[in-house]
Amino acid sequence: MEDMGEIVGEFLMESHENLDQIDRDLVSLEQEPGSRDLISRIFRAIHTIKGTSGFLAFSRLEKLAHAGESLLSRLRDGVQPVTPDTITVLLLCIDGVRAILSSIEENGSEAEVDIETMIVKIQAQMNAPTDGAPAAAPAPAPNPAFEAEEPVSVEQEAEAVVRPAPEPVEEQRQPLGQMLVDAGAAESTDVASALQQQIEGDERKLGTILLEEGKTQPAAVNEALQSQTPKRSIADSAIRVDVELLDTLLNMVGELVLARNQLVRGVMEIGDSGLVRSAQRLGMITSELQEGIMKTRMQPIEHIWSKLPRVVRDLSNSLGKQVQLVMQGKETELDRSLLEAVKDPLTHLVRNAVDHGIEDPDKRTAAGKGTEGTLTLRAYHEGGHVAVEVADDGAGLNIERIAQKAVEKGLLRPEQVPNMDRRDIMAMVFQPGFSTAAKVTNVSGRGVGMDVVKTNIENIGGAVSVDSTPGEGTVWRLTIPLTLAIIQALTVDCADQRYVVPQVAVLELVFIDGNTTKVEYASGAPVYRLRGKLLPLVRLDRALGLEVGGDQGVYIMVLQADGRRFGLVVDRVLNTEEVVVKALNTRFKDIGLYAGATILGDGKVGLILDVSSLARRSHLAVDSERENVVDKRGSGSGSTERLLVTAVGERRVAIPLDTVTRLEEFPRDRIEHAGSREVVQYRGQILPLVRLSHLLGAYGEELEGDTVSVVVYSEGGKSVALVVDRIVDIAENSTTARRDAEEDGLVGTAVIQQRVTELLDVRRAILAADPNFYSDSMDDMLVEA
Amino acid sequence: MASRQFATFEVDGQLFGVEVHTVQEVLSYNEYTPVPLAPQAVGGLFNLRGQVIAAVDLRVQLGLPRQALKGPVMNVILRGDGEPVSLLVDKIGEVVDLDDERFEPPPDTLSGPTRELVVGTFKLDGRLMLALDVIQAVDTYRATN
C-alpha cells in the first residue's frame, strides 16, 4: 500500500506539471489553431493522464480524460475546427482533471468531483455544428451513447496492455508503431498487419508501409520519428530534492554566515595576519557556499508566470477585451519561498490590469490605439533585488479621481491635494479600503486588493510602487529581495542600541553637521531640505519612545515606503551587512515597528525595523504638522529636482537640470583642437568639450552625424560643454531605487521612468573638461593650450 | 503515590517552581537587547545558539520593579508553545521530587499579581514553593499594574 501511495504521489506531481503545460498549449493553440504540434502534444499529455489513471483505477478521472481526448482527436483529425469555444471547453476539462487530482491528493478519493456536467459540455461541443465538416466521425448521441463508448476505450486499453504499465516516455525508446497507436495516428490492427508484412519479407520501413497504404498521416510519422531520437533524460542531469532538506541546509548556512561574521570580527581585533588570511578564506568559502545553497532554491519566475496566459485569456474573453500578453525575462530567478509569496499579488495585478487598465476595444479605437491592448510582464535583476513589472498600455490612472476618492474616504484632506506629488496621490491606491473602480466586478474593485498586494509584498521585505501616464498606461512595479532569509541591511545606532534597516528602503544617507546641513522645524515638525525639497523627518528615538537626542552630528536615512519619502534620524550609521532574518516572537507583532530580529556580528540580537509601519505611525502622529510642511513646500514651488536625461552609448545619464545652462547642437566640423583638448568657439568664448562617453568609459560606437549634442554649463562667466549622444527627456526625480555608484564620474544610479539611469557627477565632469574651472587661471590655461 | 518533578528558582526571596518537563534549559546570560514599546514585562531579547529568545521579566509579572539587566541574569528557558521563551529569575534552585500530598491550593491570603500566576503551594521542608502557571507566567499582555 505504501508503494501505491508513492506511485500516486508521483502521478499527481507529474500530472500537475503536465496540466500546466496543457494550459499553456491550449492558450497558444487558440492563437495558432492550425498547429498539429500543439494538438498532438496536448493529446499525448491527456492520453498519459488517462492511461495512468486507468492503471491506478481512478475511473472517473479516466472517463473525463477520455472525453477530453475524444474531442481532441476530432480536432487533430480535422473533423472539427479549433474554435475559442472548443478551447474553453477543453480548459474546463483540464480544470476538472485538476479538481479530481486535488481531491485525490486531499482525501485519496475522486468521488466528489462532478464530471458528468463537464462530459456533457464536451459532448455538446463535439456535436456542435461545424459548418460542413464531415459528420463521418462517430458522433455519439447524447448521454447513453457516450456511455456506450466506454467499453471501446476499455478494449483499446486492453490491446495496449501488451506494453508494461505506462511509464514516463523518456525512459524508453518506443517502437514507431506503438507510438503511432498511442498518439492515435494509426490503428493497432494496421500496425500489426504492417509488422506482419515486414516479417514476411517486406523491406520497407514500418512508417513507409503505413504511409503508402494510407493508414496514417505523414506529419504523425515525422513527429513520432522525432520523438524517438533519444533525448538526454532529465534523470541524468537533475535529481529531485526534498524542499525541507534545502530549507534545513539554508538555515545552517545562515548560522554559518553568522558564525563567520563573529569570527571575522574577532580575528580583526586580534590582528594576527595568518589568522586574518584564514578568516578571509573562510569568509570566501562561506559566501560561495551560501550562494550555492541559495541557487538550489532559485526558480525562474516563469513558474508563476506560466498560469498567467490562461488568466489573461479567460478574463479578457469574459470582458470582451483583446489583450496580448508579453513576457520578458521569464528566466529571472527568485527564491522559491518568495515565488510563492509573489504569486497571488502578481496575479491580482495582472487581473487588475486586464480589468481596469486596458480599455474596451471601442474606447481604444476612440483613443487612436489598436483594439488589442498589450500587457507586459517584465522581470529583471536590479542591485540585490528582482524587479517585476506589470505594464499595460491602457488609459492610465486617473489622478483626479484617486485624489477625489481619497478625500471622500477621509484619507486626505482636500487642501492637501493641490500640493501633493502625483506619485504620492497614485500611492493612495495602496491604502486599505481604497478602490476607484466605477463598477464592482467579480474580478477586482472590491476594495480588497491593492492594499493586500502591498502588505504581501512588504511582508517579504519587498516594495511596490505604481507609475502611470494618462492615456499611455500604467506600470506596477514590485521590488523583491532575492531571498527571504538573508537581506542586505544597514546597521544603525540610536540611543545606544543597534537597529537594522533593510537596504531596500534606503535611498540615501545624509550627515547632519549642524552647519552646512541642518535639521529645521516647520512649526515643530522636523524637516530637512533635500536638494531644495523638504523631507519630513522621523526621529527614531522618539518613534521608539526613547530619550530624544540632539540634532547635530546625526544621520538622516532617506527612506521610501508607501510611496512616500521620509528621513529617519539616527545617531550613527555603522555599515551594511547581510543579516539573517529571524521571525520575531508573536508577542511583538502588535508593536508593529519591527519586521524581525537578527543576530548581529557581535552575537547580540538586533531588531529589524519595519520601515513602512514606521512611516505610517509617524505620519499619523505628525498629521497636523504635515499641513505646514506641505504649505511650505508649496510656497517654494519649482524646487522639485528635475533631471535632464541623456543617452551616452547604451547608457542613460541624468544631469540635474539646474546645472544646465543651455542645450546646443554644434556642427561636427566646428570642433577644434587645443592641445589634447577639444574645443568650440561659442559666443566669443572658447568652450572646452568633454565627451561623456569617454569620461564614463562608455566606448560605444561614436555616433555619425553632422552635429553633436552638448549640454552647456556656465558659472561665473566660464562655460564647459558636455557632449552626449542624444538628449532623451526631462524627468522629475521621482526616485524609487537608488544606490551609490561604484564608478568614477557618477554620484549614483536611480530608476527614472522605469529605466536605470546614472546620475552624473557634474563637478567631476566639468573638471575633466577644464581642470581649472573652479580656479581663476582658466584664461591662462587656454592661452597656454 | 503520584509525584512530580519541579525545577525551582527564586524571585525576591520567594521560591517558585515549574514542572521539569516544561523546561528546556537553564542558563545565565548577560546581554539583552531591549525592545522599545514592548510590554513592560519583556526584559529583552537574547541569542541562544542562533535563536532569538524573548526573556520575560518575572519580577514585573509579579508586580515588582524591573530587573536591572546589568551583568549576568539567570534564565529559565521554557519550551513554550512552538517557540522557547525565557523567564528571568534571581537564582536557580534544585530540582525537587514532590508527592501530590504535599500540594495545597494557594492560600486565600495570597492576592495581587502573584495570585494569578500561581496554581498551588507545595510544602517543602522549612519553606514553601509556589507552583507557577507556565502559560500565565510568560503572558506579557497580562494586565500588570
Image (cartoon, coloured by chain):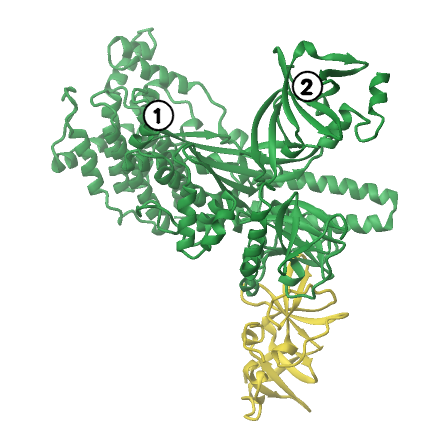
Judged left or right of residue A431, residue A698 is: right
Q: Is residue A578 visible?
A: yes
Q: Is residue A697 visible?
A: no
- Depth check: A524 or A751 in front? A524
Q: Which residue appears farthest toward the right when viewing the image?
A: A272
Judged left or right of residue A114, residue B82 is: right
Q: Residue at x 34, y 22 (%)?
A: A179
Same chain for mark 1 and mark 2? The answer is yes
Q: Report x, y in % for residue A162.
A: 31, 28
Q: Colour of chain B?
A: yellow
Residue B22 figure quarter:
bottom right
Q: Pointer 2: what residue? A: A699
Q: Residue at x 70, y 47 (%)?
A: A510
Tag 2: amino acid? Tyr
Pointer 1 local density, CA inside 10 Å: few below 14, some 14–19, many at least 20: some
Pointer 2 local density, CA inside 10 Å: few below 14, some 14–19, many at least 20: few
Q: Chain of mark 1?
A: A
Tag 1: amino acid? Gly
- Work out whether mark 1 precedes mark 2 in sequence or the reverse, and give the earlier one: 1
Q: Chain of mark 2?
A: A
Q: Residue at x 86, y 21 (%)?
A: A780
Judged left or right of residue A143, residue A578 is: right
- Depth check: B2 or A196 in front? B2
Q: Report x, y in % for residue A679.
A: 74, 16
Q: Pointer 1: what residue? A: A370
Q: Quadrant of the C terminus of chain A?
A: top right
Secondary structure, mark 2, is loop
Secondary structure, mark 1, is loop
Judged left or right of residue A314, residue A722 is: right
Q: Report x, y in % for residue B63.
A: 62, 81
Chain coloured green in this rendering? A
Do residues under tags 1 and 2 come within 8 Å of each other at their CB atoms? no
